[in-house]
């Protein structure tokens, strides 16, 4: 049993979250969800130990309660926001696997908020930085450093083009070079299953965007060609994992 007296929520309070969970489990206070969001995932991003401790109970509710599944996904997205997030998450790995299955089932129904749900799936798979940075590819920009010369580059994937460029304060994106998207067969690692999931669910824009982000870019400054995903990942590692 969890000792709730030891677990603080986003407001530093103890004891309130289990009361709220009791209420939503008994379906007697729909308004309790609002306070649960506030205490477990403040402003959609701030998590606390109580958030992770609530995951098993949210996982039980999730098959029949969209609110529970969405809140659980939002908490998992915030894992790296808390110093003990990954440790706390590991304690409920069975529930995480279960939530991942539920989110994947939901994606197969092609919900209206597909991209948000897809972001939840990425977080549940441990791809936190992709979960945080992947947009809808209408107008996405990623900042990366060229791994060869260190130039700060902008990667654009969207309706205005798919290119690498140097962002100039006055002139916008200059010296644009067309991206070199990976083919489906060339995709590896997370890019491969992310693309396969998007294709399965007929999310063409998302699938095309993933092929570009997991493809290669040419640096306008030194003309070297590099993996966008590797450059983006290394730029987004948590501080403790950075290699000096
Ligand atoms: Zn370069």
Image (cartoon, grey):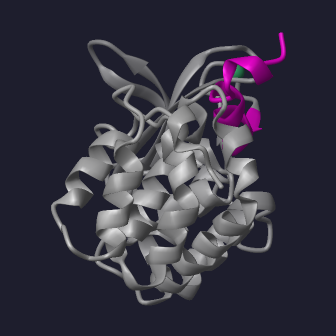
Classify 125 as above or below 227.
below
Nearer-the-camera pick, 84 or 78:
84
Q: Residue at x 39, y 58 (%)?
A: 71
Q: Residue at x 50, y 42 (%)?
A: 50
Nearer-the-camera pick, 153 or 48:
48
Classify 228 as above or below 236.
below
Q: Position of residue 180 (x, y in %)?
A: 64, 53
Q: Position of residue 57 (x, y in %)?
A: 51, 65
Residue 41 visible? The answer is no
Q: Residue at x 80, y 66 (%)?
A: 186
Classify 231 as above or below 147.
below
Q: Is residue 209 magenta?
A: no
Nearer-the-camera pick, 236 or 104:
104
In the rendered structure, the answer to whether residue 213 lies left or right of residue 61 reads right
Q: Is residue 240 magenta?
A: yes
Magenta range: 225-244
Looking at the rendered structure, the number of numbered marks drawn on it comes to 0
In the rendered structure, the answer to whether residue 228 lies left or right of residue 171 reads right
Q: Residue at x 18, y 67 (%)?
A: 29
Snapshot quadrant of residue 184: bottom right
Quadrant in which ligand 1 is drawn:
top right
Q: Position of residue 83 (x, y in %)?
A: 63, 25
Q: Quadrant of the C terminus?
A: top right
Q: Quadrant of the N terminus?
A: bottom right
Nearer-the-camera pick, 242 or 195:
242
Residue 193 visible? The answer is yes
Q: Position of residue 223 (x, y in %)?
A: 70, 28
């Amino acid at each position: 049993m969890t000792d709730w007296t030891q677990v603080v929520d986003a407001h530093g309070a103890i004891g309130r979250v289990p009361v709220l969970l009791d209420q939503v489990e008994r379906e007697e206070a729909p308004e309790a969800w609002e306070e649960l969001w506030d205490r477990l995932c403040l402003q959609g991003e701030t998590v606390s130990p109580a958030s992770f401790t609530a995951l098993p109970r949210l996982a039980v509710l999730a098959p029949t309660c969209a609110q529970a599944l969405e809140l659980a996904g939002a908490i998992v997205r915030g894992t790296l926001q808390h110093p003990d997030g990954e440790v706390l998450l590991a304690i409920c790995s069975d529930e995480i696997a279960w939530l991942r299955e539920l989110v994947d089932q939901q994606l197969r129904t092609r919900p209206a908020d597909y991209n948000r749900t897809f972001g939840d799936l990425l977080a549940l798979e441990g791809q936190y930085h992709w979960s945080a940075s992947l947009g809808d590819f209408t107008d996405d920009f990623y900042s990366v450093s060229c791994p060869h010369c260190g130039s700060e580059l902008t990667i654009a994937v969207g309706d205005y083009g798919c290119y690498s460029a140097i962002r100039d304060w006055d002139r916008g994106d200059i010296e644009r070079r067309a991206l070199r998207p990976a083919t489906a067969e060339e995709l590896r690692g997370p890019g491969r299953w992310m693309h396969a999931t998007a294709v399965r669910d007929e999310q063409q824009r998302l699938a095309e965007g993933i092929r570009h982000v997991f493809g290669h870019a040419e640096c306008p400054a030194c003309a070297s060609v590099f993996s966008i995903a590797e450059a983006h990942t290394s730029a987004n590692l948590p501080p403790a994992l950075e290699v000096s």
